[in-house]
Image: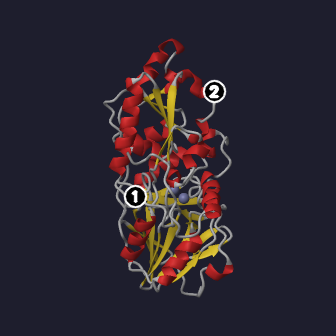
Amino acid sequence: MASEPTSNIAAEHAGPGDLVIARPEGLYCPPGDFYIDPWQPVGRAVITHAHSDHARFGHRHYLASRAGANVLLSRLPDISLQTLAYGERLDINGVTVSLHPAGHVLGSAQLRIEYRGCVWVASGDYKLDPDPTCDAFEPVRCDTFITESTFGLPIYRWDPPQAVFDGVDSWWRHNASEGRASVLFCYSFGKAQRVLASVDAGIGPIFCHGAVEPLNRAYREAGVRLPPVRLVSEIPPKEKGVFKEALIVAPPSAQGSAWLRRFGDYSDAFASGWMRLRGARRRRGVDRGFVLSDHADWPALQTAIEATGAERVIVTHGSVEPMVRWLREQGLEAGAFATQYGDDAVEADALGGVETVSESAVEQAAVEASLEPGARALDDTESRS
Ligand SMILES: [Zn+2]
Ligand SMILES: [Zn+2]
């Protein structure tokens, strides 16, 4: 979703000393002459992570974290890519840049920019919850912090991940005991691997959709431990009985498709932070909703912002206005950049352009239409057992 901040929250006091400004092509560092996750083709792009709204084709030169190189190249083959280890420093036109773990997906990074004694950090997407498939978020001190705000409303509070995975396990175990396949829909890059690494693989066999497999491979090549996972398409029709006790991980676009018929009787579920919203599970039309996000919830956004020590905060996407308002109430200088981030749900590049509607945009519109900022949504998602 393109965040279009109204003029009263647009980043103000933009001055010649600013290390990052908004340009039509993307966020731009004037002294370094590079862009951060630009949405239009540029000469030099620093990429925070390989989700499709942040990493796009068409730039002449890419800089990204070494940890994320496999995943990035699996999505954007043949790009001109330079990598940095986390914490490693690079001089670009007199500006010192370094990448620091953002805890969002494999290889995700915050970009630290230092120039003439001034430090800015651009977060990309991030979360503070533990995730066995990527390095943990690292707080980085800075003067100005550019933050996401995907779930920047007080209704968004996550249960501990282990509680969510316990819920997934017991749902799967129950289905298996009744000879019913368990189909879990989640984004094929990041969420799927986090689920695979976190469920109890002793319950039964695990399968995945063809859109998930290339990402699994990239994760394994990067040293992330995943349990044995077979492709659904490897199983001939006469052997489809193996699905009765199986967990099947599939992208949201597989929902409602003929691909599901081979499983016979199955239960389905959706894993997403949006499942926190009242009615989200029903709108999705699945049996279960698991509230599992790779973004920071409201308290974690506050924790992360405070840990930077920044006196100025600029918000890029998600619930921009409520976050800017809250930051100003804390006495911070706060504003927003209009960006084209927020379409992590678009898996068009992995699925041949099938899914073109931004799920997060749809869900965000739903929440903004139905909630006053600060209201608490009632939870009908069954994520708490
Ligand atoms: Zn992302
Ligand atoms: Zn994003």
Picture colour scheme: secondary structure
Mark 2 crowdedness (10 Å alpha carbons): few <14, some 14-19, many ≥20? few
- The answer to whether residue 77 of the structure is visible from this angle is no
Q: Is residue 240 above or below residue 196?
A: above
Q: Is residue 49 above or below residue 241?
A: below
Q: Is mark 2 within 8 Å of ligand 1?
A: no
> At 49% from the left edge and 22% from the top edge, which residue is drawn?
234
Tag shown at residue 258: 2
> At 65% from the left edge and 82% from the top edge, which residue is drawn?
8
- The answer to whether residue 36 of the structure is visible from this angle is yes
Tell me the quarter of the image containing the N terminus: bottom right
Image spot of residue 231 (x, y percent): 48, 28
Tag shown at residue 91: none
Q: Quadrant of ligand 2?
A: bottom right
Q: Amino acid at mark 2?
A: Ala
Q: Is mark 1 within 8 Å of ligand 1?
A: no
Image spot of residue 201 (x, y percent): 33, 33
Which residue matches tag 1? Answer: 103
Secondary structure under badge 2?
helix
Image spot of residue 85 (x, y percent): 37, 59
Distance between mark 1 and mark 2 Cα atoms = 35 Å
Q: Amino acid at mark 1?
A: Gly
Q: On the image, which quarter does residue 309 sit in?
A: bottom left
> At 47% from the left edge and 78% from the top edge, which residue is drawn?
94
Q: Is residue 140 above or below residue 291?
A: below
Q: Nearer the viewer, residue 99 or 154?
A: 154
Image spot of residue 182 (x, y percent): 46, 31
| Residue 143 located left or right of residue 361 | left
Q: Is residue 256 above or below residue 81?
A: above
| Extreme residue in the top direction | 238
Q: Nearer the viewer, mark 1 or mark 2?
A: 2
> At 36% from the left edge and 51% from the top edge, which residue is drawn?
161
